[in-house]
Image (cartoon, rainbow, N blue to C red):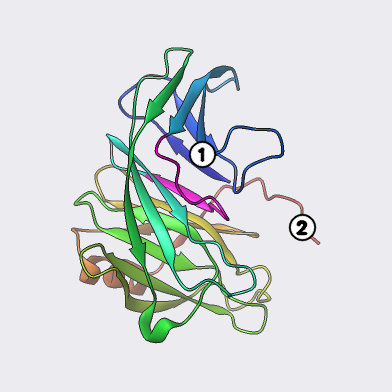
Amino acid sequence: SGLAHSRQFANVFWAHNDSTPEGETPNVIYAFNQDGGHLGKLIISPTINQRDWEDMAYDGQHLYIGEIGDNNKVHEEYYVYKCIELNPNGGDLTTTCEEFPFTYPDEEKFDAETLMVDSNGDIYIITKGDLDDASSKIFLLNTEAGTADYVMDIELNEGLTALHNLITGGDINGDGSKMIIRTYENIYIYEKSGNGVSAIQNAIADGYTIGEYNREPYE
């Protein structure tokens, strides 16, 4: 469900399931190389919530897990976990995570599949959107207050249906100069200058280019 490319360890990628598969160990982040070869596991201890992990972000030393999925919009609280990245070395290792619980403004509920960490450590969540509403919302996580603070609405290609514009992933690169947002149809690339909410708002306002993308099948 989530994917991250290590910058500490050569040819290491990380991924996780959205929930715990039957018969599998819970709270596992899997390591593999660019050819798909298994490199080991990070097993999180103490255990954390895993009802619907939707995305993973990275700051160069930590893996961030977004417990932000809510298909039916029923959860009272959401979580981001900041986990220590270890060198997998082909084995199963135990890592620890810092927990950031949060709620949205007015206790509203959202389904989200995008978690991004900027080069200054700011954590952003982008909601997926709905079939009856073409726009999604960007929030900045306030880890001290336990709130997701509204940044802006984002609406992508107006020539596509709401289904095609549902936001299913995104990332900010290591130096904070680019932001990528993925939908079922396209990858949108934004040039970004600096950090903070205004940098995100300016990047969106300046528009995007569409990247090359082998689109996944959908109905």
Tell me the mark number nearer the camera, choosing from 2 and 1: 1
- Residue at screen point 25% across, 57% down: 122
Coordinates of residue 80 in the picture (x, y in percent): 38, 55
**Figure quadrant of residue 150:** bottom left
Q: Secondary structure at mark 1?
A: loop
Can residue 180 be seen?
no
Task: Determine whether 120 is above or below 30 in the image.
Answer: below
Image: magenta residue range: 45-57
Q: Which residue occupies the extreme front position in the image?
A: 46
Between 193 and 88, which is closer to the camera in this rendering?
88
Task: Determine whether 159 is above or below 90 in the image.
Answer: below
Question: Neighbour class for label 1 at 10 Å: few (<14), some, many (≥20)?
Answer: many
Magenta-highlighted stretch: main secondary structure? loop
Question: Neighbour class for label 2 at 10 Å: few (<14), some, many (≥20)?
Answer: few
- Residue at screen point 36% across, 78% down: 152
Q: Secondary structure at mark 2?
A: loop
Between 1 and 120, which is closer to the camera in this rendering?
1
**Figure quadrant of residue 4:** top left
Coordinates of residue 132 in the picture (x, y in percent): 66, 84
Between 11 and 68, which is closer to the camera in this rendering?
68
| Disc assigned to residue 218 | 2
Coordinates of residue 60 in the picture (x, y in percent): 28, 36
| Disc assigned to residue 27 | 1
Residue 75 lies left or right of residue 103; in this view the side is right
Ranked by sequence position, the earlier of labels 2 and 1 is 1
Identify the image quadrant of the C terminus: bottom right
Amino acid type at image mark 1: Asn
